Amino acid sequence: MSTLFLRTLREDPADAEVPSHKLLVRAGLVRRAAPGVYSWLPLGKTVLDNVSRVVREEMDAIGGQEVLLPALLPREYYEATGRWEEYGDTLFRLKDRKGADYLLGPTHEELFTLLVKGEYSSYKDFPVILYQIQEKFRDEARPRAGVLRGREFHMKDSYSFDIDDEGLQASYDKHRDAYVRIFDRLGLEYVVVSATSGAMGGSASEEFLAVAPTGEDTFVRSTESDYAANVEAVSVPAPDARPVEGLPEAVVHHTPDTATIQTLVDFLNGAGLGRDFSEADTLKNVLVKTRAPGSKEWELLAIGLPGDREVDFKRLEAALEPAEVAILEEADFAANPFLVKGYIGPRALLDNKVRYLVDPRVVTGTAWVTGADKADHHVVDLVAGRDFTPDGTIDVAEVRDGDPSPDGRGTLYTARGIEIGHIFQLGRKYTDTFQVDALGSDGKPKRVTMGSYGIGVSRVVASIVEQSHDDKGIVWPREIAPADVHVVGTGKGEQIEEALRLARELEARGLRVLVDDRKGVSPGVKFTDAELLGVPTGVIVGRGLKDGVVELRDRATGDREEVALAEIVERTVAACRG
Ligand code: ATP
Ligand code: MG
């Protein structure tokens, strides 16, 4: 440490809000060069390389072959797939001296597809998995939290190419398994959530989220099982349909001043109808408008859901994708006078050919209190499947803590996570654009199918710190720590000499050693730095040396033990291998 290019800081950087940002800067691992752009200093680079090594080993183990493609890419490839436009402001675009357009790669599907097209042509060539670990560039709207969301960041991106759907599924499964092994080895607590709803084919895309309260992604998990999902992907189990026979007739009631659910429920409970009503007994009809891609026309859509729930707009957007969705304006109500605000019921919607979709809980045989399409009037006991038949279901109601888990085990609660990995069955989107075919065994060309898979290597470093720190500093998992053991020599010459000698011996035993041999630095400062840097095992060569003892410390547990000098090498090796 007397020569290491390292300066630790006592104060948190002014722009830092999350623990990993504060600690990575204070421990001297990274330095900000521009918003969302960071330099990695020696200890940080070591950690980054350690994460990359784990990723490489597991990618190699599934047969991945490492390549390195340029980050500087010509416009034409991204023009071909439409992503030159689609990426919008997120894409870093630049021009060369001749005025030709280039971009800095945000992800590399285009170039990998063309690479494979150029080299391979027969079914015998496939499958193949190619990967790289490389800087990616995205002009994020809100770079935040240091390297957690950078504008330049490190990603492992891999791409699988297969001849058929079974092959793609196999490549996808291999990646999934490799990701599980990688994140397990990195000591991360994470969940795997499906990124798309069942409609798009179950596991066509999954995200790996590191569990952290500072994460930007919300997901739900079960109290009892390992079920976890993006809120957008939660599908509410539909109850069984019930018989409609024998249910009371629907009756319209005059319900003055009941435009809100609560006033309605209060009114009904005071109306002497012989039973109690709750918000969940009401059917609320929410109006939005949607527009198909490429179309100019907005179309009305009504969503019927139990009155105790709101429409979750993100779930709605995900459910309607690729169509756009917007809330209604006054002008829309004016143009559709059958929409009586506060009193909208299924009748008017269906009579006026408004597409009407209901929450999965609104099954045949359920009876509802809902609008009677007339100001100050509601209808009680309107039965689904008897009095109205919706056009279908839509699963967009907010998901709440305590809702039953879709897998039937336990209840849901919300948590937050950081997206550290994403695996995706792309299919033939890119191979269609670039017409990548392989000659099949029958002599006919077959369109190649693809998967793409990313891990945010630099984001992983920060995610580990988010999960593994205390008020004194970082607590590195051993696999990626900047060193196995931090030997601290306190005081003057003799203790420092002994620390250096021990360091050499430990190194000879195969350990990675950081040794604090700084002269004129107080023991207090050295201990504070050691805790901040977070190397898992510490050996303190202090005043006890004259009595032949040194101290063995464990950063994670805080345990300290005096150990005879003669035994410290064996004990340290054991602690590090333990
Ligand atoms: P996010 O939703 O967080 O913006 P994304 O879904 O756009 O991420 P992908 O295109 O799936 O990201 O990229 C693959 C991986 O790269 C992500 O799972 C994440 O770990 C990492 N990553 C993406 N954007 C960034 C960034 N700005 N900084 C650091 N890592 C990132
Ligand atoms: Mg993603």
Image (cartoon, helix red, strand yellow):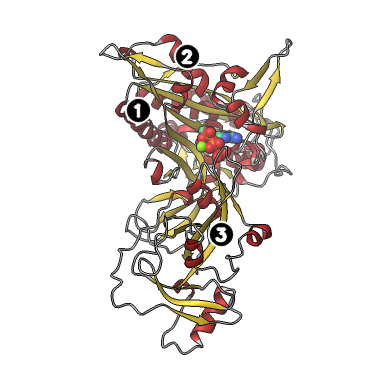
Residue in view at x 41 percent, y 35 percent: 185
Q: Is residue 151 above or below residue 341?
A: above
Tag 1: Cα neighbours inside 10 Å, few (<14), some, or many (≥20)?
Answer: many
Residue in view at x 57 percent, y 65 percent: 338
Q: Name the foreground residue: 533 vs 275.
A: 275
For the N terminus, the quadrant is top right
Of the numbered discs 3 and 2, the one sitting upstream in the chain is 2
Residue identified by numbered label 2: 115
Task: Say what secondary structure mark 3 lies in.
Answer: strand
Instruction: Locate residue 115, reporting x and y percent.
Output: 47, 14
Task: Please identify the quarter of the rendering in which residue 205 is found.
Answer: top left
Query: Is there any visible trace of residue 428 in the rendered image?
Result: yes
Q: Name the foreground residue: 331 vs 188.
A: 331
- Residue 168's tag is 1
Residue identified by numbered label 3: 287
Cα gap from disc 3 to disc 1, whole angstroms: 40 Å
Tag 2: Cα neighbours inside 10 Å, few (<14), some, or many (≥20)?
Answer: few
Q: Are marks 1 and 2 in contact (CB under 8 Å)?
A: no
Task: Please identify the quarter of the rendering in which residue 408 is found.
Answer: bottom left
Is 60 left, or right, of 340 in this rendering? left
Q: Amino acid at mark 3?
A: Leu
Instruction: Locate residue 426, reporting x and y percent.
Output: 43, 30
Task: Please identify the quarter of the rendering in which residue 573 is found.
Answer: top left
Q: Amino acid at mark 2?
A: Leu
Kindly give the residue lying farthest to the front in the view shown. Answer: 351
Instruction: Locate residue 34, reporting x and y percent.
Output: 72, 31
Kindly give the residue lying farthest to the bottom in the view shown. Answer: 272
Instruction: Locate residue 467, reporting x and y percent.
Output: 51, 45
Please state which of the two labelled residues, at mark 3 or mark 2, is closer to the viewer. Answer: 3
Q: Amino acid at mark 1?
A: Leu
